[in-house]
Amino acid sequence: MAATNPIDIQSLVQPDRVHKRVYTDPAIFELEMDRVFGQAWLYVGHESQVPNVGDYFTTRLGREPVVMVRHTDGAVNVLYNRCPHKGAKIVPDGSGSAGKFLRCLYHGWTFKCDGSLLSVPLRSGYEDTALDLKSGSHSVRKVARVASHRGFVFASLSQEGPELADFLGGVATSLDNFCDRAPDGEVEVAGGVQRVIQRNNWKIFFENLHDTIHAVATHESSWRAAKEEFEAMPSGTPKPFEVVIVDGNGEPLEFWENLELKGYDNGHGFMEGIFVPPTDPVSLAYVAALEASQGAQRADEILRVNRHNTIVYPSCSPHTSFQQIRVIRPLSVDRTLVEIFSFRLKGAPEATFQRTLKYTNIVNSPSSNVMPDDLEAYNRVQEGLGSDGGDWVSMHRAAGRDQPLPGGRASNGNSEMPSRNMFAAWASYMGVQNGSAE
């Protein structure tokens, strides 16, 4: 729903600061649903979630309910989850198997898994009416465009715009590395899904993913506890995985400064250099499996890709080192659903997958040691932005110091370049043209 009066988007987004309205104005949120989520390529799911004919997985693209389903020809289709008869959702929310066809529970209309109409009860009642059941106009509508990269399925609600490969640009290599880390070269969704409803605008979540300065302050309670736990262990005790992950947030700001942030066109990016190669038994067994499959040189090339919180703007954040994807579903101007999916590396030891689940539970689950800190910070930001205490949000840190990359830019680890990069893409989607968007 467009705003009644023109919104001067250009006046709200400046090179080094943004106006609070971009986080708090419901009219701007409605424009985002049309112009950002209605145009960009959005992550739908992974092909492994629909392995067999008739398997389906439901989700939303912006405000649109859709269903990803495997057809008899093996193709993965993404359809609007709406029966063309009376408008009912054809399949319930979630996932399951519909068999070889989709059947609407309301009146029993059935459709092939590519959306084409298969059968209608009492077809004879439609003779001499304006409804032509043979024309194809009463098939389940497909979304405008669907494409996949290494099994990761994306869709766009718009017929216009770049192809998926051009849209992904430099972050396609993160999805490649995600799969390359599997000894068999493939991954699959496993371990269920965790969901968190955040009381904040969706853009706040994305900005925090590459905000390195917050970690030592926001997560002090957990990293201090982890350090104290380790210090109380007998001398020479190997540092447990849980401690390694949690106490990393307590690294001094100089550590984060030495990392590298990369931002790409369309708002994408990632952080590099954060993880030290582990030498614990679980990690060594995994490396051995990868080397046995790919050879030592290729395995080393794969594992040298050291990235944290890749951003595929505006819909998801894959984590290549610990095989999870966080999917962002904006619900309203101040509510955001984040879904966390874990993946199994095919051919890797089972302990590797268990470590993935452990990482999710420690860091990103609703009851983790880390995520509640972030949720509290996000909520305080959202509430503070609603006050009259100021109008602008700063993105000044290291402004003007970015180094050019093909299709993007790079900066040191404590720069706010990622926020500036995302808002440049956001402004473009929102139609900054002649100074306004209507």
Image (tube, rainbow, N blue to C red):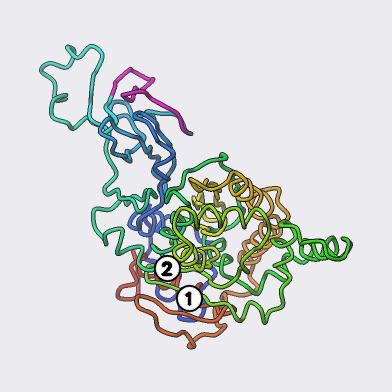
Q: Is residue 337 left or right of residue 33?
A: right
For the point 56% across and 76% down, the residue is 392
Sequence-wise first label, 1 or 2: 2
Q: Element type at marker 1? A: helix
Q: Is residue 97 magenta?
A: yes
Q: Amino acid at mark 1?
A: Arg
Amino acid at dot 2: Gly
Identity of the residue furthest to the left in this view:
128
Identify the residue shown where x is 39% and y is 53%. Answer: 42
Q: CA distance from mark 1 to mark 2?
A: 9 Å
- Percent coordinates x, y for residue 422 in the rendering: 45, 69
Q: Is residue 48 above or below residue 133?
A: below
Position of 223 relative to 181 (above/below):
below
Q: Which residues are magenta?
A: 95-110
Q: Position of residue 259 (x, y in %)?
A: 58, 77
Question: Which residue carries the number 1 mark?
Answer: 420
Query: Crowding at label 2, few (<14), some or many (≥20) Cα neighbours within 10 Å?
Result: many
Image quadrant holding the C terminus, namely bottom left
* 398 magenta-colored: no
Count all numbered tags in the image, as a single digit: 2
Quarter of the image for residue 229 reads bottom right
Q: Which residue is mark 2?
A: 267
Q: Position of residue 369 (x, y in %)?
A: 73, 55
Q: Position of residue 183 (x, y in %)?
A: 47, 51
